[in-house]
Amino acid sequence: MRDTTTVGDELTDTQTAGAPSTSGTAGKKAGSGKPQKAREASLWSDAVADLRRNPIFVIGGLLVLFMLVLSAVPQWFTSGSPFDAAACNLQDSLKKPSSDHWFGFDVQGCDVYTRTVWAARNSVIVGVVTTTLVVVVGGVLGLIAGWVGGIVDSLLSRFTEIFFAIPLLLGGMLIMSGLGKGNAWTVSVVLATLGWPQIFRIMRSSVLQNKNNDYVVAARALGAGTLRITTRHILPNAVAPVIVVGAISLGVYISTEAALSFLGIGVQPPEISWGLMVSDAKDRWLQAPHVLLFPAVALSITVLAFIMVGDAVRDALDPKLR
């Protein structure tokens, strides 16, 4: 019999006293003659394995992938364009869905299906760009505050509290109404300006929990520099909660953009978004429910898909839920 001990990435075999040697047979792949290496377990590898078996993540991930493709290449899904004035005919105003026009027509006689497909672009752009900016800005500042500490941490924390006093939707309404006409990129910058403090606090707290762990102390003792410690040891262990919150918040930013556009201070015509379509349908939805139904369902499915992915990632990365 033999004891097998895994150290790092290598497999070390120790012969048990008094036991006959079985060298050349155990620990080797059949027919290869090479010792089989043990796969090192980690939080990330376990999380990936859990996500592959999680039906919520699979369904949500497929929906997210579909929405990303839809927003990137809407012409794959419809031959029409909402920016072509000739495509709208007032004679078709509020016509109900049919076999030729699945989603019917809106007040202006424009095809609702075409507009719903193209509206995905601005809505998804706002969610993805805002989340990226929030994670980068809040993550970097939180990493600096948690690692450096002292006066730097105090100043950044007090500065962050200023933005925490401003509600996301109310602040977005105030800023966008002052800016006047907006587009997806303007809305993204405004929401990111108001949303980064949440990621800052999460990253800062995570860094503070990890900076005094044994592996960080050992890296310091071995002479590792600040850059190496933060990028190789602190960041990989502190970024998990940031990824979870970012994935869930993406759906929140999409719904916030829809609310701003509904109020007429978000994405402005001739651009198009689901919030604008809902706004256009608010006075006629009893007369023609399909004008409101389809963009609202598309918005709800997209937000739900990102929240499903975020919840699944949270469950996979939280050791307490295992």
Image (spheres, helix red, strand yellow):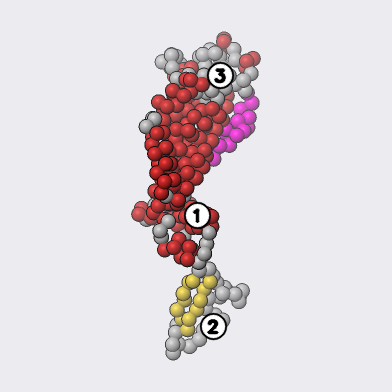
Earlier sequence position, callout 1 versus callout 3? 1
Q: Which residue is mark 3?
A: 269
Question: How far is disc 3 from disc 2 in space, using C-alphas?
Answer: 75 Å
Which portion, as a residue range, is magenta?
60-80
Q: Amino acid at mark 1?
A: Thr
Earlier sequence position, callout 3 versus callout 2? 2
The tag on residue 230 is 1
Q: Which residue is mark 2?
A: 23
Question: Relative to 277, does residue 159 appear above or below in the rendering?
Answer: below
Q: Amino acid at mark 3?
A: Pro
Question: Relative to 171, does residue 148 appear above or below in the rendering?
Answer: below
The quadrant of the rendering that contains the C terminus is bottom left
Could you say whether the residue bearing mark 1 is in a helix, strand or loop?
A: helix
Q: Which residue is more in the foreground, 211 or 168?
A: 211
x, y percentage for residue 64? 51, 39
Q: Are marks 1 and 3 in contact (CB under 8 Å)?
A: no
Q: Nearer the viewer, mark 2 or mark 1?
A: 1
The tag on residue 283 is none
